[in-house]
Image: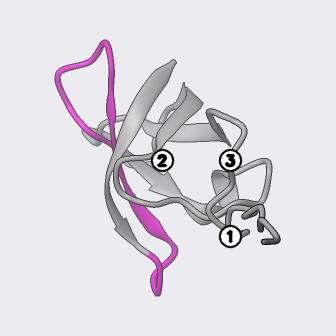
Amino acid sequence: MLGTVVKWFDENRFGFAKPDTLPFDVFVHADSIIDQGRLHVGQRIAFDLAPTARMGLKPRAARVSIVGAASFDEPPSRSRQKN
């Protein structure tokens, strides 16, 4: 499933994503990110849905991966031109 990060609390290591095909946001925890990247608001992610342990709660995101080649953990490379 694909979605977009809509809230991220870096200090608490969790946030919420809006799935492309569901009418509600899902909980995302940093431990669920399989490529060890950091999430940021507006970032596209792919994930599976997993049930929550507490009855009545919406499913949570599991096996989260960042969509696209760029990682926010590393600054983009810049080419320098010599004059």
Counting every numbered tag in the picture gives 3
Which is more toward the observer, 3 or 29?
3
Residue 70's disc is: 3
- The Cα atoms of the two marked residues, 3 and 2, are separated by 33 Å
Between tags 3 and 2, which lies in front? 3
When the figure is inspected, residue 46 is found, relative to residue 60, above or below; the finding is above
Magenta highlight on residue 2: no
Left or right of 61? Residue 8 is left
| Callout 1: SS | loop
* Residue in view at x 80 percent, y 50 percent: 35
* Residue in view at x 82 percent, y 71 percent: 82
* Amino acid residing under circle 3: Ala
Mark 1, other Cα within 10 Å: few <14 / some 14–19 / many ≥20? few
| Callout 3: SS | loop
Residue at the disc numbered 2: 53
* Residue in view at x 48 percent, y 22 percent: 2
Q: Which region is colored magenta?
A: 10-26
Q: Residue furthest left?
A: 23
Marked residue nearer the N-terminal end (3 or 2) = 2
Residue 75's disc is: 1
Marked residue nearer the N-terminal end (2 or 1) = 2
* Amino acid residing under circle 1: Pro
- The Cα atoms of the two marked residues, 2 and 1, are separated by 37 Å
Marks 3 and 1 in Cβ contact (< 8 Å): no
* Amino acid residing under circle 2: Ala
